[in-house]
Image (tube, rainbow, N blue to C red):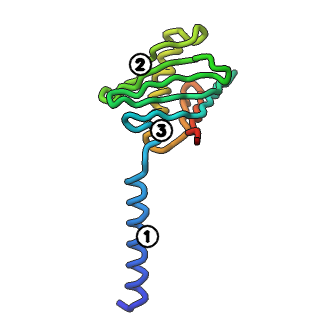
């Protein structure tokens, strides 16, 4: 093998190792244990949309979260049980406090949490035509 080929192979190997190491050490967008994070959240549905702020806090066993609109009214409070990999709706405003709506929200919130764990900020529920965009708010 000539010198140029060896150099190209070496540089290519280093390049791919850098890519793999950056992906494996990528940090989750969910709060770490003992921390809390704030997010800008938009839920788009076929006939309406809801936007507001989502606050999540991780206590080690679960991630507790609340979604507020821009006026400070609480729309939804939930808890993600880390060990069981389940979302539990703790409270919901009267308009969405129906068992069938809460079932969809529980599945969609679990999808949002999975997206945040994978550094993704968008979730799409194609069955119900719901798009959720959640982006960290920077200080």
Numbered badge on residue 101: none
- In three-dimensional space, the C-alpha distance between marks 2 and 1, rounded to whole angstroms, equals 43 Å
- In three-dimensional space, the C-alpha distance between marks 3 and 1, rounded to whole angstroms, equals 27 Å
Nearer to us in this view, 62 or 108: 62
Residue shown at 62%/30% (left/top)?
Answer: 42
The residue labelled by disc 1 is 15
Pinpoint residue 25: horizontal percent, then vertical percent: 39, 53
Residue shown at 43%/25% (left/top)?
Answer: 64
Could you tell me which quadrant the N terminus lies in?
bottom left
Above or below — where is 80 with respect to 103? below
Numbered badge on residue 88: 2
Q: Secondary structure at mark 1?
A: helix
| Number of residues whose C-alpha sits closer than 10 Å to that of mark 3, classed few (under 14), some (14–19) or many (20 or more) | some
Nearer to us in this view, 50 or 129: 50
Pinpoint residue 60: horizontal percent, then vertical percent: 33, 31
Residue at the far left: name it.
Answer: 83
- For residue 103, side relative to residue 10 (left or right): right
Q: Secondary structure at mark 2?
A: strand
Pinpoint residue 77: horizontal percent, then vertical percent: 49, 18
Pinpoint residue 49: horizontal percent, then vertical percent: 67, 25
Please say if the residues under marks 3 and 1 sit with CB atoms less than 8 Å apart: no
Earlier sequence position, callout 2 versus callout 3: 2
| Number of residues whose C-alpha sits closer than 10 Å to that of mark 2, classed few (under 14), some (14–19) or many (20 or more) | some
Residue at the far right: name it.
Answer: 47
The residue labelled by disc 3 is 115
Nearer to us in this view, 93 or 56: 56
Could you tell me which quadrant the C terminus lies in?
top right
Residue shown at 43%/70% (left/top)?
Answer: 15
| Number of residues whose C-alpha sits closer than 10 Å to that of mark 1, classed few (under 14), some (14–19) or many (20 or more) | few
- Residue 118 placement: quadrant: top left
Above or below — where is 124 with respect to 3? above
């Amino acid at each position: 093998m000539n010198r140029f080929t060896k150099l190209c192979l070496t540089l290519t190997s280093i390049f791919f190792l850098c890519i793999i190491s950056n992906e494996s050490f990528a940090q989750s967008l969910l709060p770490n244990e003992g921390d809390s994070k704030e997010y800008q959240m938009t839920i788009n549905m076929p006939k309406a949309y809801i936007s507001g702020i989502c606050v999540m806090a991780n206590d080690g066993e679960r991630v507790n979260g609340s979604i507020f609109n821009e006026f400070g009214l609480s729309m939804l409070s939930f808890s993600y049980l880390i060990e069981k990999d389940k979302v539990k709706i703790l409270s919901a405003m009267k308009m969405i406090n129906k068992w069938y709506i809460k079932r969809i929200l529980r599945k969609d919130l679990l999808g949002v949490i999975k997206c945040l764990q994978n550094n993704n900020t968008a979730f799409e529920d194609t069955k119900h035509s719901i798009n959720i965009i959640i982006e960290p708010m920077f200080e």
